[in-house]
């Protein structure tokens, strides 16, 4: 799978995989059907993204706000997550994908945490696409947790407050050692970031798609890359 050789392929793509439930309901099915199809779409995209030239993908799978959804839907999502994590270890090995989970893992059930640890450990030496899955994640929550870690290190004399700068903060974020996203894709027509990667998206280009996530294809990804390639990224500077 290739794109036009003239395209500037983003190194890191963040994705808000929106519209799974609405996609299913439009077909007369339950919302969990849409979430299952959405997980298949993610697998398909990840299998081909690295060949296009993308090195990192970070997806918003379950936010801190999603806990307010009906209990039945949350239970279904957690069971789907259990199945996904189990199959992902085999898939990551097959497709050479390194998987990392970001977010507050302490808010998840113990068996899910164990599966996450096994997946991260089992895929850590893979050299292809690096996939970050945001679970029980919120951008504001990440900043709160980052602040607590810095304060703790300061109180234990592990950090000098006078040396704290943006690079310091980045080392305490969930995404430490990962470059900021170049491109954010959100499906289903919504045009907001919904508390996703608030620090990291400071200079990210946004691309919004009307399609719901289960209908998103590799061709849609290539369209997003074409859009990104036509943008002149100045990072607050002016063109000479």
Image (spheres, rainbow, N blue to C red):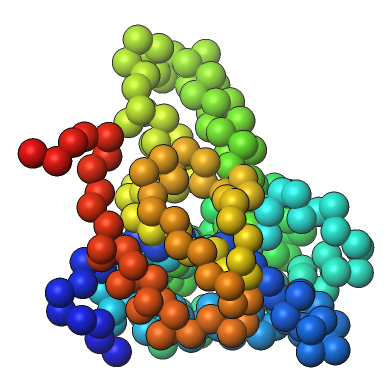
Q: Which corner quadrant holds the C terminus? A: top left
Q: Say which of 62 and 156 sits in front.
A: 62
- What percent of the width, then of the height, locates residue 67? 81, 54
- What percent of the width, then of the height, locates residue 10? 29, 63
Residue 181: quadrant of the picture = bottom left
Residue 31: quadrant of the picture = bottom right
Q: Residue at x 34, y 55 (%)?
A: 182
Q: Residue at x 43, y 43 (%)?
A: 200
Q: Say which of 8 and 147 sits in front.
A: 8
Vertical placement of residue 44 versus 109, above or below:
below
Q: Which corner quadrant holds the N terminus? A: bottom left
* Lateral position of residue 146 relative to residue 164, left or right: right
How many marks can you see? 0
- What percent of the width, then of the height, locates residue 20? 70, 75
Looking at the image, can residue 132 be seen? Answer: yes
Q: Outermost residue toward the top? A: 162
* Lateral position of residue 89 relative to residue 81, left or right: left
Q: Which residue is drawn at 54% across and 21% down?
A: 152
Looking at the image, can residue 39 be seen? Answer: no
* Lateral position of residue 80 relative to residue 203, left or right: right
- What percent of the width, then of the height, locates residue 50? 31, 77
* Lateral position of residue 202 relative to residue 71, left or right: left
Q: Outermost residue toward the left? A: 240
Vertical placement of residue 218 versus 163, above or below:
below
Residue 225: quadrant of the picture = bottom left
Vertical placement of residue 34 versus 210, above or below:
below
Q: Residue at x 28, y 79 (%)?
A: 52
């Amino acid at each position: 799978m290739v794109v036009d050789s003239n395209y500037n392929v983003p190194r890191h793509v963040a994705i808000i995989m929106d519209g799974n439930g609405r996609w299913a309901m439009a077909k007369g099915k339950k919302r969990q059907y849409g979430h299952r199809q959405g997980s298949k779409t993610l697998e398909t995209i990840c299998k081909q993204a690295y060949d296009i030239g993308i090195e990192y993908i970070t997806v918003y799978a379950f936010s801190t706000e999603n806990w307010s959804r009906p209990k039945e839907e949350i239970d279904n999502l957690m069971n789907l997550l259990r199945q996904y994590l189990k199959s992902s270890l085999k898939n990551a090995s097959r497709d050479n994908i390194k998987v990392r989970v970001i977010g507050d893992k302490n808010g998840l059930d113990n068996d899910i945490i164990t599966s996450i640890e096994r997946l991260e450990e089992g895929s850590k030496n893979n050299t292809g696409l690096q996939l970050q899955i945001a679970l029980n994640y919120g951008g504001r929550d990440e900043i709160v947790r980052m602040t607590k870690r810095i304060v703790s290190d300061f109180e234990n004399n592990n950090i000098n407050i006078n040396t704290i700068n943006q690079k310091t903060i980045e080392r305490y974020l969930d995404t430490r050692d990962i470059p900021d996203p170049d491109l954010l894709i959100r499906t289903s027509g919504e045009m907001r970031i919904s508390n996703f990667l608030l620090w990291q998206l400071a200079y990210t280009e946004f691309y919004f798609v009307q399609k719901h996530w289960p209908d998103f294809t590799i061709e849609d990804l290539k369209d997003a890359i074409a859009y990104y390639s036509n943008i002149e990224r100045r990072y607050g500077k002016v063109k000479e």
